[in-house]
Amino acid sequence: MEKFAVRLKELRTGRRIYQREVAEAINISVRTYQAYELGETEPNITRLVALADFFQVPLDYLMGRSDTL
């Protein structure tokens, strides 16, 4: 899920949002969110949907299955 980690970081930094803000919005710890961006761990489906909703992007885009926003 390397592409997921890259997309996640690009979405966040492109919008100038802190990791803490995303973590709080989807109700996880900052360290857990950091692990997602570093590709150390993968979120479950509930968290994936929450991240896609937070960034207002399709799940396929977030997962690297599509380049269409």
Image (cartoon, rainbow, N blue to C red):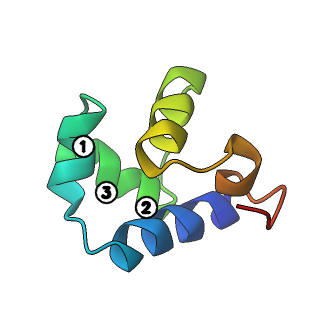
Point out the image quarter for the C terminus.
bottom right
Percent coordinates x, y for residue 43 in the rendering: 51, 35
- Depth check: give the residue in front, 23 or 11: 11
Percent coordinates x, y for residue 2 in the rendering: 65, 64
Dot 1, how many residues are within 10 Å of its Cα: few (below 14), some (14-19), or many (20+)?
Answer: some
Residue 34's mark?
Answer: 3
Residue 23's mark?
Answer: 1
In the drawing, does residue 45 fall left or right of residue 31? right
Q: Earlier in the sequence, mark 1 or mark 3?
A: 1
Distance from disc 1 to disc 3, alpha carbons, whole Å, reads: 9 Å
Seen at 40% across and 78% down, the residue is 14
Dot 2, how many residues are within 10 Å of its Cα: few (below 14), some (14-19), or many (20+)?
Answer: many
In the drawing, does residue 43 fall left or right of residue 45? left
Please state which amino acid type lies under the numbered disc 1: Ala
Dot 3, how many residues are within 10 Å of its Cα: few (below 14), some (14-19), or many (20+)?
Answer: some
Q: Quick check: 54 above or below 9?
A: above
Label pair 3/2, CB-CB below 8 angstroms: yes
Percent coordinates x, y for residue 62 in the rendering: 64, 53
Distance from disc 2 to disc 1, alpha carbons, whole Å, reads: 11 Å
